Amino acid sequence: MPDLGRAFLAAAARSPSACAIVDGDRRLTYAGWLDRIRRAVGGLDALGLRPGDHLVTSLRNRLEAATLHWACQLASVVITPVNWRATRDELGYVLRDADARALVYEPVSAGAVAGAAAGAGTGAGAGTAAGARSDRTFPRIALDGAPHATDSWERVFESEAAPAGPAPRATADDLSVMLYTSGTTGRGKGVPRRHRAEQAAALAHIAHHQYAFGESTLGVMPLYHTMGVRSLLSSAFLGGAFVCQPRFDAAKALDLIEAEGITSLYLVPTLFHDLLGHPEFSPERVASVRRVGFAGMPMTDALVRRVEEGFRPRLFVNHYGSSEVFTFTIDQQAARKPGSAGRAGLNQEVRVIRLGSTEPDEVVGSPGEEGQIAVRLDHDEAFDGYWRRPDADAKALRQGWYFTGDTGCQDDEGDLFVTGRVDDMIISGGENITPVEVENVLSLHPAVAEVAVAGLSDERWGQRVAAFVVRRAPVAEGALDEHCRASTLPAFKRPRAYAFVREIPKSPVGKVLRRQLVAGEYDPEP
């Protein structure tokens, strides 16, 4: 399997005049974009970056971010993107942990950059990397005149005097990218992925979503997230257009879909919810979209119905996976069996392990029994282990299997249902309750716009089920309780507390932050 740099060169040779990327009023063909990418390789060389070095970026989805991603593939530099909303401490941690050799950022991240570069390049606890720079000389390359920089994007990466980069330097076994997990339970973990793993994941993504040559996609899932990277790579492999949206806005997204004739959407459920809920949404405006896919978190039964009705897609894919492995399971007919994550993806095997077990052979005894989901690691799509985190490896990597930390069960037909996170499990009176099951029931009430369920501390029961509801129309707790009683939800799983909130707290990629709900960190309705 070739490296990613050669894969891009092949795409550019095959479709030189095709539209490759759109960013506002900036549009480039593959031939034009390749010229910029080669100049960016020359800029990496001018900074003194060598194969295997880490370049940290703090950028939104824009032309420069996508250009750097591909330039790093050609130069065999490990691109290490971080959330542009990261705090000074979070950014500083990544710079030290990754032994970063340079940082590229824009004004929105300048406040964090001001203090984060202190100690950058001096290595993490494992020691100083060879040739590490001091804070005084650590390169900080700014876009759009952002402060605290040592140089500008234009001078380093777009200078007419900068030589075009040479042929690809990476092999399939070299590192391509290092993503950081969200760190919801502590410091984020580095997930280094090799060229072969990235290429295998992109090809599987194309197959699972049945993308065609020339497919255009909305590039709104951030490039520090595996979904964003997958969209970027797959669109290039197929000579399609990656239409940048630096920050999600439902109205702007609808405009881009309509104006650019976007054919595929790969988003977290939250963004589908926002698109469908926007007053300017109509099926006619999104008529060009033929394929929709979601990942990152389960989609409620009610939202599945709304997506099916609003987009009328030819293919509606539930894609379940992670940064570490990417694809676990696929269901290409998500509306057929709402809640189902389907069955194992290409080259994959999935097991449901008894809760509390660390042995991959200790699978649950029967359909419907809940356990921890585990997937195989011995294939090209998977990573090799976390960056400098033997503790995390010991917890998640066992005898060639990746223990995902997700809970789930399989039905009589072998379809997998993801029910939540092991850490999110509510234990009330000795009974295990998964938030997703309760959320699915409440989401079907017509007055409920959004709902999240979490466990609150209870002296008698250990935890009690609490529902946090964004109302679409006036509704009282009693009516919601009656709705639950009339459903198939067992009595012990019914919410014992309700809170009506303005919005559900979420991570930058749309995952519900249950810990904030438990801590009372939400905005209640007046």
Image (cartoon, rainbow, N blue to C red):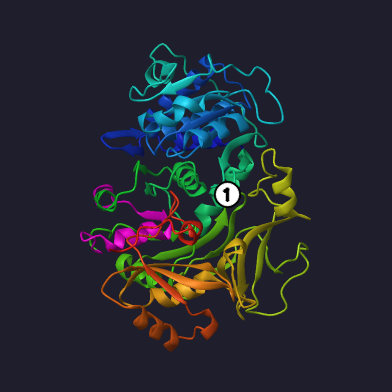
Q: Which residue is mark 1?
A: 323
User: Closest to the observer: 190 or 135?
Assistant: 135
Residue 18 lies left or right of residue 455; in this view the side is left
**Quadrant (top left, top right, bottom left, bottom right) of the C terminus:** bottom left
Q: Is residue 492 above or below residue 520?
A: below
Residue 273 placement (x, y as % from top left): 35, 62
Q: Residue furthest top?
A: 161
Q: Is residue 252 magenta?
A: no
Residue at left offset 50%, top offset 19%: 139
Q: Residues within 10 Å of mark 1 (few under 14, many from 20)?
A: many
The magenta segment: 256-283
User: Closest to the observer: 135 or 14?
Assistant: 135
Secondary structure under the numbered disc 1 in the rendered image: loop
Identity, as a three-letter code, of the amino acid under mark 1 = Ser
Residue 295 lies left or right of residue 20; in this view the side is right
Residue at left offset 38%, top offset 54%: 264
Residue 471 placement (x, y as % from top left): 31, 69
Image-quadrant location for residue 359? bottom right
User: Closest to the observer: 45 or 10?
Assistant: 45
Residue 174 placement (x, y as % from top left): 65, 34
Residue 69 lies left or right of residue 199; in this view the side is left
Residue at left offset 78%, top offset 67%: 361
Image-quadrant location for residue 485? bottom left
**Quadrant (top left, top right, bottom left, bottom right) of the N terminus:** top right
